[in-house]
Amino acid sequence: MSLHDGLREYFGKSERRVVLVGVGNPMRADDGVGPKIIELLEERPLDNVMLLNTETVPEAFTGKVEKHKPTHVVLIDAANFRGQVGETKLILGTQIGGQAISTHSLPLNIFISYIERSVGVPVILLGIQPKTIDFYKPMSPEIEEAAVSIADTLYQVLSE
């Protein structure tokens, strides 16, 4: 299933209030893809969509997420699922479990389960396969390109 189709299925056709959470460390090459996508979307705001660039501390933003009263929450982050560089995968919070799919020390499943319990909506992770997450390296061209494509897809689906 394409990213576009997967997102359309997740969001459905009903009224929605969405929170997009960009997670990642911009000082670690491709790990900065989540915040990069949020920055690209900030250039063209959408109604009923809250954009949060949380970098490496999404847990510090739980209050903002709760206050928005979202119907859908999407975390956007580099994730090592052994795919092709730049490949995307939509992963339900329940599918993450204790897996170290994220590149961060605090497992995202802790943040996800908290949001799901406090807000009562299913959270998904939009994972992007990185090429490298080395410190002090620039984002790889493949991930730069993927970030633009993903931002365009999110904008298109959320504009429908």
Image (tube, helix red, strand yellow):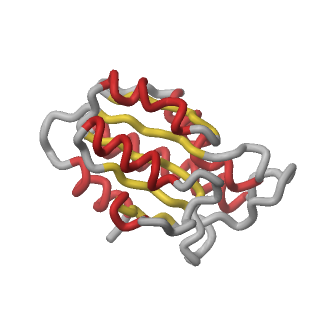
Residue in the image at 31% along x and 54% along y: 7
Relative horizontal placement of residue 94, taking residue 145 as reference (left or right): left
Instruction: Spot the residue most to the left.
Output: 14
Q: Does 114 appear above or below 95?
A: above
Please tell me in which quadrant of the rendered image residue 133 appears.
bottom right
Report the number of discs.
0
Counting from the top left corner in percent of width and height, residue 97 is at: 42, 66
Relative horizontal placement of residue 72, taking residue 31 as reference (left or right): left
Q: Does 147 appear above or below 120?
A: below
In this view of the protein, which residue sits in the foreground, 116 or 25? 116
Relative horizontal placement of residue 27, taking residue 119 as reference (left or right): right
In this view of the protein, which residue sits in the foreground, 1 or 124? 124
Residue in the image at 42% along x and 25% along y: 63
Q: Does 24 appear above or below 127?
A: above
Counting from the top left corner in percent of width and height, residue 89 is at: 44, 65
Q: Does 81 appear above or below 127?
A: below
Quadrant of the drawing holding the N terminus: bottom left
Counting from the top left corner in percent of width and height, residue 140 is at: 75, 58
Residue in the image at 39% along x and 46% along y: 74
Counting from the top left corner in percent of width and height, residue 135 is at: 84, 53
Please tell me in which quadrant of the rendered image residue 14 appears.
top left
Instruction: Spot the residue most to the right.
Output: 136
Residue in the image at 70% along x and 67% along y: 131
Quadrant of the drawing holding the C terminus: top left
